[in-house]
Image: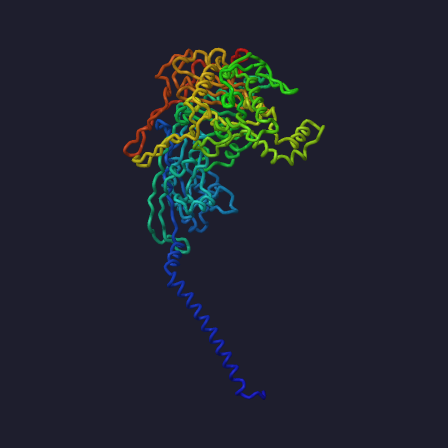
């Protein structure tokens, strides 16, 4: 028994009780305040969120807008197909989660059961495709290629197919009018990704999981206008996912129609002629290597000279954009992206880079004038140009004596431009440039729009390359360590080059400028850049930003937004020099010019034509064929990789495209009834009151009757040999 008196223990107990009471009341006060905050202060907000947690939405995809050519012919539209879909909500109510139903469905659709089951499984980070990336509460498409009989079987035996529907729906299609695929220009669609949904959720055009979006071409550039707005119906569901009722709905809005400047008839001609030119040249032998030309890829651009609008654009190899409709198979995707396919998804008109060869000489002639050289002075066209112990040959080593710059274009004389490029390099200080060196050749190339994007309304355009002093410095800085590690003085050829590059790779050497003057060396250009430059010579000096889109028409046809041509610069030379260039280029297709043998009988008095041939050397490959041409109305540039000479490989195809445009026969006689576009198309197609457009009929391109048809077991017809010295 304790000896502590009772009166000594009581104050301590009382203090403890008070502390406990304070703690309890503080805890109750805190909990009460928090409860007030949740239920009263922010009660409505959390109530709304709780409701939303039990609201699910079913999306009805908007009908995507059509893409039309300049006359209203559909290049991409929608067709009604029988789409068989499965409702996960209904299937999950079945004891076996719908496995038997899906197996029976696979039998009707002549599909494998595992393929059907995989179609409706939900995507997550561990689930391989195919899987469903959309809402689990909306019907999931199993196939969009059901036959009428299959749809009837499903409907008539609906008790055997709970949760399965077979309904008509709009599906994207690319009809290829007149066999004009227009593949790389149009692009293709694929489902939206989670990253894209998250990125766009706060913008003015958020994505829904059911959306298909443009992945390339104008399907991508004008995706927002074409996509429209999906309809959404919202349902209240309980915590088991059962639908309890319907709430508000948002009506869908169809996508707008895009009218392009493409003419499907000209596009069909361009695609056919490019493909035919490549096939034909593969039967020719490269005199340098002794083997057949590979002609592995090519591109052609047909542009309005006074607006920059694209009338046709073809790239080879190409593909069928319908392969992407409904989801591309793994097999087809591998075929389109493998090295063996040579990457047909690339639009080589805007993404294919190559040395320019002699079509670059209009830039060099302009640079010479800017540097103070007279266009009509005489310059020595010798058979070769010497630099130390190196000799730079004229093409086929043919000389023409003293000639003007216009004649240098006509004969495509390399040595005239070698000398001018070398002189300007020396004037600028050579290896040790003067402060504020003019660098007229490099500056003029950039002022022609080379080394930068043209601004065409197609995605992923490349810039090409102008290897000026700054580029040399940057390239050296990026590669110096590797060169120094690999290089060895007195070693193998490759080691010696690496050694020299390590020490001097940042210097702009004399041979760099000599090669640059004829579009060789490290120069890279694209067909669209050269088409823009040559169009500018034709129209008096305006560098237009090329456009494919011509107008956007609202779904009801009441609103038409025309896409006006815009310019991004002017040529850096005056009107007199432009006239001199024009005259020199005109002589290229006249007797004695390098393209004359391909344009015999052309009516120069009625339809003046100008041209420049180019044969670009590429290290480790056969030469690249270039032909840049223009009339008063159109510019056509064609290139064929590993295709040989400019006039030899590309000449016949370009001539045939012009003949189709103007309705000409081989003798130069014009029949306007046969002419596809004797002048650029100015008016937009007529829109009906209901927003539809009546499209004219179009048939497949009928090649000229004089084209030689291969006989049985015979190869492609041989190209006629050019006159001596006319193969640039």
Q: Of residues 43 and 468, which is closer to you in this image?
A: 468
* Residue 323, placed above or below residue 657: below
Residue 278 visible somewhere in the drawing: no
> Where 330 sits versus 511, above or below?
below
Name of the residue lying farthest toward the left: 689
Q: Where on the picture, by quarter, is residue 693?
A: top left
Residue in front for this viewpoint, 309 or 147? 309
Q: Quadrant of residue 221?
A: top left
Give the x, y percent position of residue 256.
Answer: 35, 36
Q: Nearer the viewer, residue 565 or 602?
A: 565
- In this figure, which colouring scheme has been used for the structure? rainbow
- Name the residue furthest front: 435
The residue lying toward the viewer, choosing from 690 and 532, is 532
Q: Which image quarter is the N terminus in? A: bottom right
User: How many numbered markers are drawn?
Assistant: 0
- Above or below — where is 726 with respect to 269? above
Residue 433: % across, % down: 59, 29
Above-or-below relation of 540 to 555: above
Looking at the image, which residue is at 61% across and 33% down? Answer: 476
Quarter-wise, where is residue 68 in the image? top left
**Could one spot residue 284 in this view of the protein?**
yes
Q: Position of residue 241 (x, y in %)?
A: 41, 53
Q: Position of residue 184 (x, y in %)?
A: 46, 30
């Amino acid at each position: 028994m304790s000896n502590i008196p009772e009166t000594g223990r009581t104050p301590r107990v009382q203090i403890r009780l008070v502390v406990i009471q304070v703690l309890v009341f503080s805890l109750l006060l805190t909990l009460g305040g928090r409860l007030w905050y949740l239920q009263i202060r922010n009660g409505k907000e959390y109530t709304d969120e709780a409701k939303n947690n039990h609201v699910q939405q079913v999306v009805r995809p908007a009908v995507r807008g059509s893409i039309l050519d300049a006359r209203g012919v559909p290049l991409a539209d929608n067709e009604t197909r029988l789409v068989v879909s499965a409702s996960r909500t209904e299937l999950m109510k079945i004891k076996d989660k719908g496995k038997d139903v899906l197996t029976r469905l696979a039998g009707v659709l002549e599909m494998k059961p595992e393929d059907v089951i995989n179609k409706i499984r939900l995507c997550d980070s561990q689930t391989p495709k195919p899987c469903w990336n959309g809402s689990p509460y909306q019907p999931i498409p199993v196939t969009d290629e059901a036959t009428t009989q299959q749809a009837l079987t499903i409907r008539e035996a609906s008790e055997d197919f709970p949760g399965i529907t077979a309904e008509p729906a709009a599906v994207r299609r690319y009809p290829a009018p007149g066999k004009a695929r227009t593949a790389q220009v149009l692009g293709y669609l694929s489902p939206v990704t989670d990253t894209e949904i998250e990125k766009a959720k706060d913008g003015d055009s958020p994505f829904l999981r059911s959306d298909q979006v443009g992945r390339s071409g104008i399907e991508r550039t004008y995706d927002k206008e074409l996509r429209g707005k999906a309809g959404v119906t919202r349902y209240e569901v309980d915590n088991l996912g059962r639908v309890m009722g319907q709430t508000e709905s948002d009506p869908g809005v169809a996508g707008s129609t895009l009218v392009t400047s493409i003419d499907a008839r000209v596009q069909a001609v361009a695609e056919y002629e490019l493909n035919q030119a490549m096939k034909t040249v593969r039967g020719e032998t490269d005199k340098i290597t002794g083997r057949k030309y590979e002609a592995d890829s090519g591109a052609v651009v047909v542009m309005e000279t006074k607006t920059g609008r694209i009338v046709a654009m073809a790239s080879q190899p190409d593909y069928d954009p319908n392969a992407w409709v409904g989801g591309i198979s793994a097999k087809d995707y591998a075929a389109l992206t493998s090295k063996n396919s040579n990457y047909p998804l690339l639009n080589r008109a805007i993404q294919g880079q190559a040395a320019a060869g002699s079509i670059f000489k209009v830039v060099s002639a302009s640079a010479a004038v800017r540097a103070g050289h007279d266009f009509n002075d005489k310059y020595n066209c010798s058979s070769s140009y010497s630099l130390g112990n190196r000799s730079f040959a004229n093409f086929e080593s043919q000389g023409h004596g003293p000639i003007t710059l216009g004649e240098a274009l006509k004969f495509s004389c390399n040595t005239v431009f070698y000398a001018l490029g070398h002189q300007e390099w020396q004037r600028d200080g050579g290896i040790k440039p003067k402060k504020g060196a003019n660098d007229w050749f490099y500056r003029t190339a950039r002022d022609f729009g080379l080394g930068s994007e043209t601004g065409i309304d197609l995605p992923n355009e490349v810039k090409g390359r102008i290897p000026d002093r700054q580029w040399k410095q940057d390239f050296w800085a990026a590669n110096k360590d590797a060169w120094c590690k690999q290089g060895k003085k007195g070693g193998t050829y490759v080691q010696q080059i690496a050694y020299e590059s390590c020490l001097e790779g940042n210097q702009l050497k004399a041979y760099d400028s000599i090669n640059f003057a004829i579009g060789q060396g490290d120069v890279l250009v694209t067909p669209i850049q050269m088409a823009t430059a040559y169009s500018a010579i034709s129209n008096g000096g305006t560098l237009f930003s090329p456009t494919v889109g011509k107008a956007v028409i609202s779904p009801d046809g009441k609103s038409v937004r025309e896409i006006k041509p815009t310019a991004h610069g002017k040529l850096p030379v005056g009107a007199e020099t432009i006239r001199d260039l024009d005259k020199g280029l005109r002589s290229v297709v006249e007797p004695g010019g390098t393209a004359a043998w391909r344009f015999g009988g052309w009516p120069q008095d009625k339809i003046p034509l100008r041209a420049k041939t180019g044969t670009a050397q590429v290290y480790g490959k056969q030469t690249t064929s270039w032909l840049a041409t223009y009339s008063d109305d159109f510019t056509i540039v064609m290139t064929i990789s590993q295709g040989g000479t400019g006039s030899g490989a590309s000449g016949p195809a370009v001539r045939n495209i012009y003949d189709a445009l103007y309705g000409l026969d081989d003798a130069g006689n014009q029949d306007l009834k046969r002419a596809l576009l004797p002048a650029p198309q100015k008016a937009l197609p007529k829109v009906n009151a209901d927003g539809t457009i009546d499209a004219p009929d179009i048939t497949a391109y009928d090649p000229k009757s004089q084209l030689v048809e291969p006989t049985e077991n015979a190869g492609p017809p041989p190209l006629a040999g050019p006159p001596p010295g006319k193969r640039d």
